[in-house]
Amino acid sequence: MSTITLQLKLRLFIYLGIAIFLLNIPVIYFEITKLNQRLVNLELAEDLYNTILEVRRYEKNFLLYHDRESLLSNRFYFQQASELFSKASMQFQKSFLGSDIAQLGKALQEYEKFEKLYSNPSALTTNERIETKLRNAGKDVVAAADTLLKMQRRRVSRAAGNALKWPLIFMGAMLVLFLIGAKIIIADVVRPFGLIEKAMQKVAHGDFSPIPYGNKNERRAGHMVAAFNRMVQELESREEQVIHSRKIASLGTLVSGCAHELNNPINNIVLTADVLNSKREMTTERQEQLMGDILNQALRASEIVKNLLEFSRAETSVHKEFDLAALLRETMRIAENHIKLSHVTVHDKIDDNLPRISGNHQGLQQVFLNLITNAVHAMEGGGNLTIRAQRENGNKVKVQVEDTGTGIDESILPHIFDPFFTTKDVGKGTGLGLSVSYGIIKKHGGQIQVQSKPGRGTIFTVTLPVHTKIDQDLTPPCGERMA
Amino acid sequence: MKETTVCILDDEPIVGDRLKPELEDDGYSVEVFTDSASALNRLDETCFDVFITDLKMEGVDGMGFLEKVKEKCPDSEVIVITGYGTLESAREALIKGAYDFITKPFRIGEIRAAVKKAKKRAKRNIA
């Protein structure tokens, strides 16, 4: 089946349909012509029958009254009947009515024989024996004509039946052909298209799982599905590059923020060391305090570096168990500088009894950092950022990032998870943050939703299962990919 | 001659704590603030000769503080210190009237030298 391409199949069906249609025309033409011919024949047979009845009528009159007029009329009609008979015998011979015609011919000859006896006007006397014979011959003629007529009627009705039957047969054949064609089109085109449409919608939201290749319907659309899966695979590897470059980009903004953070403790260490180094007199306590400050500030600097590393490490997306509340607070700390500078107040409503969840720590951190950064961007000049996290029914955790910012217009709300969709100025945003976030959450088997009121603010809700099972093929490019 | 007054504003308490004794040794009268609000309150009462301010702070940031100082005390000099010095922020600070722009980390000596020069300029302004 799969060796015959869809194109060939469709072409075959179109040709077959045309062939049936073309065959239909001569057959119907032939049948109608035959019917027409038989109608002409039937008319002839009816004329012949009626004329013979006339012959018989005047024969009866003559035998009753022995008048000359009846005899002449009888003769006249007999003459007509003979002419009609010769015409009919020529016609009917062609249509295989030989035996019936021959019978009528014989009967007519017999009748003529007895009738001739009355050709002499002087013989207008009665003769019982001859009269009886004439009557019997007449009856035979009528009977033969009747048989012929009935036969003709049958033939007409049969031809009419045929003329009706053939178009019905062809229409039936066309219908069957059409049904088979429709079935093939549905199986080979419509269903795969539906399949691919569904898969495309998933891809549009960052879910790059290939179309499963198992069952019969999908195998039929093999070429298309295989091509699609190849494309998706290609897209996925591009997407991973995009995630990576996105990370590098966000790292850039992070680094500038962190530089400030890092320079403060370094500055404190330098100043303290300068003081210790100077020849000024100081108490032992003061010296100890200064030493302690150097140590604390060095630790503070190293903590910042650790955070940076944690975020930037190009490690494979290891799937580990971790404390979601700690991750959220850590993320808030990374964004702290940005938050402070935008005069945004943070409300920490993270439930302290959150279950530990399993998943990609770094990926999720990227998601929440993205949501927080977006929220802060929406509140230029201040506002309230609320981060909620709590356990939900059914072994799920719900994290909400709520801002009191500009909100998202209803018309663009459906597009915010689309790749490269951005409301920021050219060069300010890549339009990838939310689409990448969507992909990461999807890979965790979770959901990300948005509610927004323009001018009032936006709530992003992330729901994650407590125990995520990540497909093996979702490890980033540097990890060994499982087919 | 009146004692030269110096105001240090940085949300890192260590900065003020280390600079104050050193600058006092140089003969200045030093006051230290760790938030811009209290520094602004003090600014309402008196003009210092030299201001040292960090740029990135909660509330009114260093740039805003610089503007307020220049508005209230046009004769005072302002030294801006920042942990993340960009050309843009340096340019902006100088346009707004800052006397010097020093990036963290800095040595105590740098600040002493900067304050010394700023003091001369401030006195000339008054004269």
Image (cartoon, grey):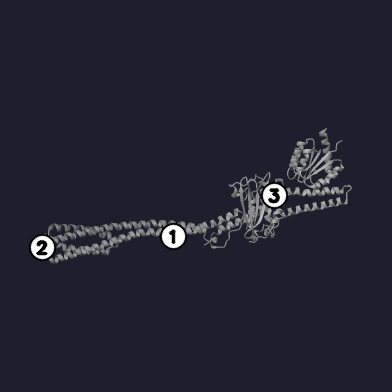
Q: Nearer the viewer, residue A434 or B127?
A: B127
Q: Secondary structure at mark 2?
A: loop
Read off the residue under disc 1.
A176
Callout 1: chain? A
Give the left or right position of residue A127, taking residue A242 as reference: left
Q: Nearer the viewer, residue A361 or A3?
A: A361
Q: Earlier in the sequence, mark 1 or mark 3?
A: 1
Q: Classify mark 3: residues with Cα within 10 Å, few (<14), some (14-19) or many (20+).
A: some
Of discs 1 and 3, which sits in the foreground?
3
In the rendered image, the vertical position of residue A226 relative to residue A272, given as above or below: below
Q: Which mark is residue A125?
A: 2
Tell me where residue B86 appears, x and y as whole percent.
Answer: 75, 43
Callout 2: chain? A
Tell me where residue A382 appears, x and y as whole percent.
Answer: 68, 45
Number of labels in the image equals 3
In the rendered image, the vertical position of residue A415 relative to residue A52, given as above or below: above
In the rendered image, the vertical position of residue B70 relative to residue A181, given as above or below: above
Query: Do residues under tags 1 and 3 come within 8 Å of each other at their CB atoms?
Result: no
Q: Classify mark 2: residues with Cα within 10 Å, few (<14), some (14-19) or many (20+).
A: few
Q: Residue at x 72, y 51 (%)?
A: A334
Give the left or right position of residue A369, taking residue A88 as reference: right
Read off the residue under disc 3.
A346
Query: Do residues under tags 2 and 3 come within 8 Å of each other at their CB atoms?
Result: no
The type of residue carrying mark 2 is Thr
Q: Indicate the quadrant where residue A146 lies.
A: bottom left
Of discs 2 and 3, which sits in the foreground?
3
| Label 2, label 3: how far apart the Cα atoms are | 141 Å
The type of residue carrying mark 3 is Val
